[in-house]
Image (cartoon, grey):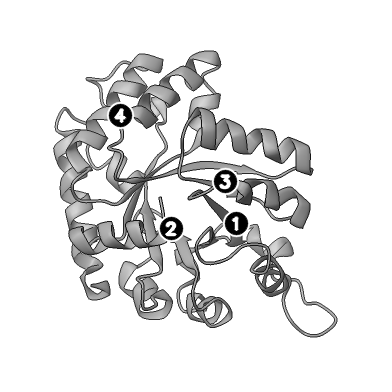
């Protein structure tokens, strides 16, 4: 999917919502069996209830890989169930030497046909560029994450006074371009998103942390939007587990609509 196609879908729906698919078997409604087929059925019902009010889905691979071989099978089925006009992200956080990255890219872009994959930048340019060799596919590079441990390294001060994450953003932006590279920027950093936007005026940001993690969509938009939207705002648990009863899909839809209303200022 190209940048213009993604933005057209956003404008059509007045939505920047990305729904994270993190199916934790211990949190499934009582009506859903805690097994691979039940997890697949749960995710499909979430998709069926929300696909017209979001623009992207982001399966987190850990929740599928933990199921063993069946996890990969249901992941493939799940991706095929997502309407083809919606943006799909493999939340895999891969990153390795060039030839290994090339194989990861083939797995996600050719076999599973995702539009994008999350990638860790720690090993540098040659671990990222193999993912950028595929037309109309995207790397979503970890830029400034929202977890507590992000302070361990990402904000280390460099000799020139800049922070490590700033150095990573500036250097990596030269590896790709705004048509094939996005950045993960955590919503719980609030106004700091504005600083990241000043460093990267044209790139899309994938912003996790809205909803159950406490991030605020209005703050994200006021500090992070650009002329082409520039934001995919992710919510996972607040949508997936909006209800633990048989009405879970309906409640998921209601939560997605509520979050969209918070994003209305973007359009």
Instruction: Identify the secondary structure beneath mark 4.
Output: helix
What residue is at 26 percent from the left and 56 percent from the top?
9
Give residue 12's position: percent from left, percent from top.
19, 60
Q: Which residue is mark 4?
A: 81
Question: Mark 3 to mark 2: distance in Å?
Answer: 29 Å
Q: Is residue 23 left or right of residue 147?
A: left
Q: Nearer the viewer, residue 211 or 134?
A: 134
Q: Which residue is mark 2?
A: 209
Instruction: Identify the secondary structure beneath mark 3.
Output: loop
| Badge 1 vs badge 3, beta-carbon distance below 8 Å | no
Q: Is 157 placed above or below 26 here?
A: below
Q: Considering only order in the chain, which callout, 2 or 4, is on the residue closer to the N terminus? A: 4
Give residue 201's position: percent from left, percent from top.
50, 79
Question: Mark 1 to mark 2: distance in Å?
Answer: 16 Å
Give residue 177's position: percent from left, percent from top.
57, 66
Question: Where, by quadrant of the figure, is residue 101 drawn?
Answer: top right
What residue is at 73 percent from the left and 71 percent from the top?
164
Q: Is 242 placed above or below 227 here?
A: above
């Amino acid at each position: 999917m190209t940048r213009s196609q993604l933005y057209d879908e956003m404008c059509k729906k007045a939505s920047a919502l990305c729904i994270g698919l993190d199916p934790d078997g211990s949190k499934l409604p009582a009506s859903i069996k805690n097994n691979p087929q039940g997890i697949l059925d749960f995710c499909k019902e979430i998709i069926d209830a929300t696909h017209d009010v979001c623009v992207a889905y982001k399966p987190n691979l850990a929740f599928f890989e933990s199921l063993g071989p069946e996890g990969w099978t249901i992941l493939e089925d799940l991706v095929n169930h997502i309407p083809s006009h919606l943006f799909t992200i493999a939340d895999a956080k891969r990153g390795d030497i060039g030839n290994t990255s090339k194989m990861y890219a083939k797995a996600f872009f050719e076999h599973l046909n995702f539009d994008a994959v999350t990638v860790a930048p720690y090993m540098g340019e040659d671990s990222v560029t193999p993912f950028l060799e595929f037309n109309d596919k995207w790397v979503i590079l970890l830029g400034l994450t929202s977890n507590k441990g992000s302070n361990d390294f990402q904000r280390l001060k460099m000799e020139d006074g800049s922070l490590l994450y700033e150095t990573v953003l500036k250097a990596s932006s030269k590896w790709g371009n705004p048509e094939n590279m996005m950045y993960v920027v955590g919503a719980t950093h609030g106004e700091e998103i504005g600083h990241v936007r000043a460093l990267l005026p044209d790139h899309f940001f994938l912003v996790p942390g809205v909803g159950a993690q406490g991030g605020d969509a209005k703050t994200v938009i006021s500090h992070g939007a650009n002329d082409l939207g520039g934001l995919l705002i992710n919510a996972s648990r607040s949508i997936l587990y909006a209800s633990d009863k048989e009405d879970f899909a309906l409640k998921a839809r209601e939560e997605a609509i509520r979050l969209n209303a918070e994003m209305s200022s973007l359009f």
